[in-house]
Image (spheres, rainbow, N blue to C red):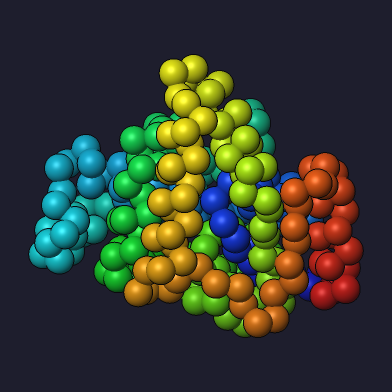
Amino acid sequence: MNKKIIITIDGWSSCGKSTLAKQLARELGYVYIDSGAMYRSITLYFLRNHVDWTHPEAVHEALGHIKLEFHANHKNGQSEMFLNDENVEYVIRDLVVAEKVSEVAAIREVREFAVKQQQAMGRKKGIVMDGRDIGTVVFPDAELKIFMTADNAIRVQRRFKELYEKNPNVTIEEVRANLEMRDYIDSHREVSPLRQAEDALVLDNSHLTIRQQLDIALEWVKERL
């Protein structure tokens, strides 16, 4: 089974895309690329450096100072996001970044910047990448495209649980509002809006265990190989 393929996982926020992508990468010995982490890192850079992203010149200037890389953490077996040689894997998960990332990711030049890097990472195949436009824009010819979805109330609960562990002051109302806002921006933006690729397989994991969703995806991989 030496043939390697590209697997794309798109879908709404808090559907467990990255959980599945990491599992698949581990099982198959593939590289996992978290496209969301790239947009979060760009957002973090903009926030830290007070970049006015409503001004194209400011965006263009700032992107020239951004270097994004994934490095393997051999202790936990994960790939972690580095922004200009600083490990930002945990900083970028903050609600402050989450509240702005959809706005930043909707900017054409930001998306072009990130997509170019993502496509370069996929040249050798053997990757699993998750995001919003991976199967439609970044790798339209990917061998396996998965579109993930889950019941809204379940997504809110999952996200709340994840954020509560880091910040016990977060409220479920804040989380719900943040998810609704991100869904709206992601699906209505002018550049590469979130939509299901015509040849994507839909995985609704509202009532699946992590193991069950992995088994379904592995079956799909087998069919493609």
- Judging depth in this view, the residue of 120 and 172 nearest the camera is 172
Q: Quadrant of residue 135?
A: bottom right
Task: Give the image location of residue 52, x and y in percent.
Answer: 14, 52
Using residue 7 as the reference point, say whether residue 35 is left or right of it. left
Examine the rendering and report whether any part of residue 130 can be seen.
yes
- Judging depth in this view, the residue of 214 and 207 nearest the camera is 207
Q: Quadrant of the C terminus?
A: bottom right
Q: Residue at x 53, y 23 (%)?
A: 164
Task: Give the image location of residue 217, x and y in percent.
Answer: 81, 60
Examine the rendering and report whether any part of residue 139 can be seen.
no
Vertical comparison of 141 with 188: above or below = below
Q: Residue at x 65, y 47 (%)?
A: 16
Using residue 204 as the reference point, say whether residue 98 is left or right of it. left
Which residue reaches farthest top? 168
Task: Give the image location of residue 7, x and y in percent.
Answer: 68, 66
Q: Residue at x 47, y 50 (%)?
A: 180
Q: Quadrant of residue 91?
A: top left
Q: Residue at x 58, y 80 (%)?
A: 140
Q: Quadrant of the N terminus?
A: bottom right
Vertical comparison of 39 with 188: above or below = above
